[in-house]
Amino acid sequence: MRLSKNEFLKGCHDADGMSELIQIAEKVYQTHQPIWSNFVSGKLREEAIKKLKQLTDIECSSEGGYKCAERHRLLFEHINNPLKSQKGNIPITGLRVEGNFLFDHPSKNDFLDALNLIGLPSEFIGDLWVIRDRGANAICSKEIDFDLNGLKGKLRDVDFQCESVPLEELQLPPQRVIKEIATVEASYRIDAIASAGFGISRAKVVKQIKAGGLRLNWDKLSQPSKLLAPGDRIQHESRGVLEILSIECTKRQRWRVLMRRT
């Protein structure tokens, strides 16, 4: 290992999470045995993979269960690993959370909180998405030390039940076509750009920002007036991701914005 722990942690937004990943990398370096991490956030995943590329003895890859997954498990492997690569042997499975939510519409975070209460820690849960009024689907770790099938809980006044299923039986979120969008706006505030990029009203964007439905570069967002810059990414809980490619001032002092929606 050529980098010290302090170098890995420098500028990291989640020092505890990065420390755990460093410990895994060190163990793999010593034993030459591949190890999968727990699920990590999108931001930590990107930071870790970028930093670990600087190591010559450890390879790091990730998998979240489907193409546009945000939360992934990281696989650490020694370049001289005597075993066959574990990249195709991903220790994840599907999870259905079923209940009658016709008259109650929980959010993604509501379901995550409810699963935590019945003993399913967040580090064992990957992406979770709401399936209209029927409940939610999620990706979870295979190493959970109890049987998920039939596990019951309550979300506010609604009873729900869990079922472990193969990934291919999940109703995955819709996979979006990558699209470049060009727009000219009076400002390059996040509420204006998100409105144009996601095709929803500016008032609705502001409401969703206040409700926690939009994030900027993986972080929670509270100010609709936040100004953007090229390279910024806006994450919407149900409409995908907007990446800002360029921002230019026009002759009429408006702003020409080019972005990519995925």
Image: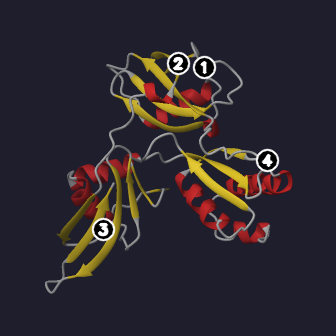
Q: Amino acid at mark 2?
A: Glu
Few, some or many C-alpha atoms within 10 Å of disc 2 (few <14, some 14-19, many ≥20)? some
Secondary structure, mark 3, is loop
Left/right of residue 184 with respect to residue 138 in the rendered view: left
Q: Position of residue 7 (x, y in %)?
A: 73, 72
What residue is shown with label 4? 33
What residue is shown with label 1? 148
Q: Could you tell which of marks 2 and 1 lies nearer the N-terminus?
A: 1
What residue is shown with label 2? 163
Q: Could you tell which of marks 4 and 3 lies nearer the N-terminus?
A: 4
Mark 2 to mark 3: distance in Å? Answer: 43 Å
Task: Judge whether 201 appears above or below 107 on screen.
Answer: below
What residue is shown with label 3? 189
Q: Could you tell which of marks 3 and 1 lies nearer the N-terminus?
A: 1
Q: Residue at x 69, y 44 (%)?
A: 36
Q: Could you tell which of marks 2 and 4 lies nearer the N-terminus?
A: 4
What numbered label is drawn on residue 139? Answer: none
